[in-house]
Amino acid sequence: MNRVGVLISGRGSNLQALIEAARGGSLGGQIALVVSNVEGAAGLDRAREAGIPTETLPHQGRSREEHDREISGKLQEAGVDLVCLAGYMRLVSRVLLEAFPARILNIHPSLLPAFPGLKAQRQALDHGAKVTGATVHFVTPGLDSGPILLQEAVPVLDRDTEGSLTSRILEVEHRLYPRAVALVLGKKYRLVGRRVLTEGA
């Protein structure tokens, strides 16, 4: 069975969506390990409650490459086939990218390439965007710049606050991420240049 490793830094709501999809048989694999760079991250409790092994690997006082080397080792020991960033608030280095080439996914709360980086929901509101959304993409060295696997739009309402927009985007993320993981684990995609083709793959 395909094995997934998930990297988190916080509460792990997207992790929970992946856990539920795995439990229901729609993920196409099982979650083999959850790693957090933050001690006491709430997502670790979600993993433990689901019986998933966890590791806490703080990054403070260490180079990004050294930290990623330790993470890569733990993921490889667990036999991980695909790595999912789920609220992981760290840029990954080439060490991790080379250990899992074209096998790291991230989910971002905007329709990339619009509004990359932090506070994408705030960026959308400040820019006056009428539509934003969620994107699952392959991770590359650039910030939120990898090939796009799946996207779904979310309208920006006149009454929206950052909190309300974040909540509605999260609902979409929780549907989108398990679908994207299932596509990759099922090898139901082709990468042609920057385009990820899924129909008839």
Image (cartoon, rainbow, N blue to C red):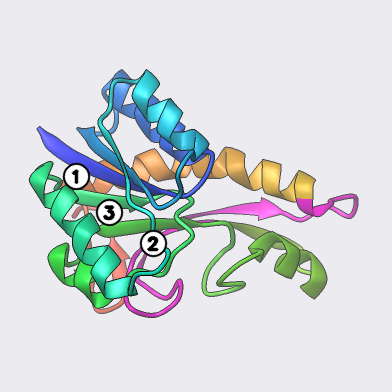
Q: Earlier in the sequence, mark 1 or mark 3?
A: 1
Residue at 78%, 44% (x, y): give it: 164
Residue at 60%, 54% (x, y): give it: 153
Q: Which mark is residue 74?
A: none
* Secondary structure found at label 3: loop
* Secondary structure found at label 1: helix
Membership of 137 in magenta stretch:
yes
Residue at 14%, 55% (x, y): give it: 73
Q: Which residue is mark 2?
A: 59
Rendered image quadrant of residue 192: bottom left
Q: Which-is-in-front pick, marks 1 and 3?
A: 1
Which segment is the magenta one? 134-162
Membership of 159 in magenta stretch:
yes
What whole-number distance in Å separates the C-alpha atoms at marks 2 and 3? 40 Å
Number of numbered labels in the structure image: 3
**Callout 3 crowding tier (Cα within 10 Å): few <14, some 14–19, many ≥20:** few
Q: Which residue is mark 1?
A: 185
76 relative position to 28: left or right: left
* Secondary structure found at label 2: loop
Q: Is residue 84 above or below residue 47?
A: below
Rendered image quadrant of residue 21: top left
User: Outermost residue toward the front?
Assistant: 61
Q: Which-is-in-front pick, marks 2 and 3?
A: 2
Q: Quadrant of the C terminus?
A: bottom left
- Do the CB atoms of the residues marked 1 and 3 lie less than 8 Å apart? no
At label 2, the amino acid type is His
Q: Which residue is mark 3?
A: 199
Q: Quadrant of the N terminus?
A: top left
Q: Earlier in the sequence, mark 1 or mark 2?
A: 2
